[in-house]
Amino acid sequence: MSAPVLTAVAWPYANGPRHIGHVSGFGVPSDVFSRYMRMSGHRVLMVSGTDEHGTPILVQAEKEGLTTRQLVDKYNRVIAEDLQGLGLSYDLFTRTTTGNHYQVVQDLFLALWRNGYVQSKTQMGAISPSTGRTLPDRYIEGTCPICGYDGARGDQCDNCGNQLDPVDLKNPRSRINGEVPKFIETEHLFLDLPSFTESLGSWLSTRTEWRPNVLKFSQNLIEDLRPRPITRDLDWGIPVPLDGWRDAPMKRFYVWFDAVIGYLSASVEWARRTGDADAWKEFWTDPAQAYYFMGKDNIVFHSLIWPSLLLGQNGAGDKGGTPGRFDTLNLPTEVVSSEFLTMSGSKFSTSRGTVIYVGDFLKEFGPDALRYFISAAGPENQDTDFTWDEFVRRTNFELANEWGNLVNRSVSMAHKNVGAVPAPTAPTAADAELKALAKAAFTSVGDNLRRSRFKAAVSEAMRVVGAANKYLSDEEPWKRKDDPARRDTILHTALQVVSDANTLLTPFLPHSAQKVHELLGGKGVWAAQPEIRQVDDLDDPSISYPVLTGDYAGEQASWESVDIEVGKPLEKPEPLFTKLDPKLGETGPEWAPIA
Ligand SMILES: [Zn+2]
């Protein structure tokens, strides 16, 4: 029996369009994984949405001359369209400004509050002396008090990974205008992280399958957990459902607090939209498994902070307690973090001008070339430089020459000589060996995908493609005019392996996999694609918004070798991939020229 799988994908922040660095961290890996899991018989719930609260949204809205609502509406739609274009098969991609999300966040908070895991404290908060406005932690920069790194942010040091308090930064300054922030007293609610130290420690010690860097990083941070503020002086966010707080105009939940709860609220929203409001539970309780996908700058939220919220909700920290409205929720099975996709050695960043937006990329190159690049050459285990040269090489030599050409010549020859899938006779050892190699790959590629080893998985799949190309060169069916029986057997073998390789590549290349399915005479949906639907807010029908969703249960792709059907008519194939001009590798496209 296959356990239900929750794929929890990091929430893109709605202050601008997303670049290819973002989708290489959370997007493509989570979709490849989910597609594989569905193909191998698991029920999958893949959820996420846009993260729409917090000060950076206010700052960006001001910059664009929009209201905050207009800004988040704008980028929610842009991001949803980009992710749809990339073929990311979300069951629900929603947003954090829904009535449902507000309700779930407040309910989960109340469970933490009742169980004693939240305390009120007065702390020093930074304001901008020139505007009088709250200066959020991440807009304060200074020298890390722990490691001495000079670019540390008020909330976190990217160099040593420690959580920080802006008051502790040496030489603090505003990242907005460079002025020195003023610290004033303000009351806030804190999550009592130290009361989860023991539960987190024993849970992490069971997470032996995690990528070692993620596990080690998390275990190192456990000893230094400190209470973490979950509220902010801000008017854009979710109100705190406590007397004295509920109506305070400048007290809201901190954006990170509401955003991580999005995994749960999106699952609940998905269930409510299916008509079975409890359907989410199957994906949050045993034996379900939960896989979280993100870039490495978000590990701490998924390996320590979100698990702490879950433990507190469950009543399972030092202070005990009873489960809240959501009963007992599962902790992450695995936290799958990617490293950074860099450009010319520096992190993709809008401010530094080295940015390639997903929308621009898709318009020119389509989704599968990018999906392939990220899977085969992305930052799975280490920071990886994106170069146009490498992108062109992967697209032309691996996708077009190797895979596209194998499909094209196999189908063309069968179409020209037989007009249909030819019948085999008297197979040779070479035929049997190639077919066995392709069949065996279902195990090796599948094992790698299950463990989120995408590079190893795609290279195993491409090994089958390489072997099939070599087989055709060795067997030379085009020279077998005087022996049509042997020619047909070779072509049958090649088409069978094309069919198997197409299944193996479907999680990576779902769009071209659909085409290959049709080139082999298949009908109907092989690999389903997400669509954007305009829906009404479940709790306020006067508001409507776009969600990304899809009907994946109807797709035919299944993780197994299926015998091709002799006699199925074959059309003359169109090329599967367009080769790129090699000059692009030197210059980059016009809209992102290489400096
Ligand atoms: Zn540091």
Image (cartoon, rainbow, N blue to C red):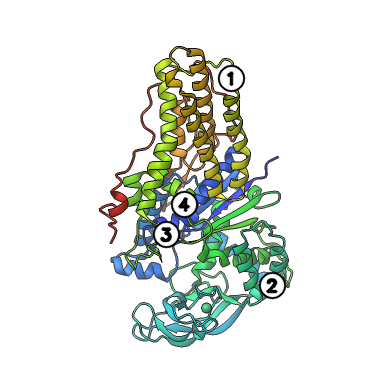
Secondary element at tag 1 = loop
Q: Earlier in the sequence, mark 2 or mark 4?
A: 2
Residues at marks 4 and 1 touching, judged by CB atoms closer than 8 Å: no
Q: Tag on residue 197?
A: 2
| Residue at which label 4 appears | 377
Which quadrant holds the C terminus? bottom left
Residue 216 occupies which quadrant of the picture? bottom right
**Taking 317 as reference, is 346 left or right?**
left
Pick the residue in front: 209 or 359.
209
Give the mark toward the camera: 2 or 3: 3
Give the mark toward the camera: 1 or 2: 1
Q: Residue at x 56, y 63 (%)?
A: 105
Measured Cα–Cα span from mark 4 to mark 1: 37 Å
Measured Cα–Cα span from mark 1 to mark 3: 46 Å
| Residue at which label 3 appears | 385
Across and down, in percent, residue 541 comes to: 44, 51
| Residue at which label 1 appears | 427
Q: Earlier in the sequence, mark 4 or mark 3?
A: 4
Measured Cα–Cα span from mark 1 to mark 2: 63 Å
Crowding near pointer 2: few (<14 within 10 Å), some, many (20+)? many
Measured Cα–Cα span from mark 2 to mark 3: 37 Å
Secondary element at tag 3 = strand
The amino acid on which the numbered mark 2 sits, given as a three-letter code, is Thr
Residues at marks 4 and 3 touching, judged by CB atoms closer than 8 Å: no
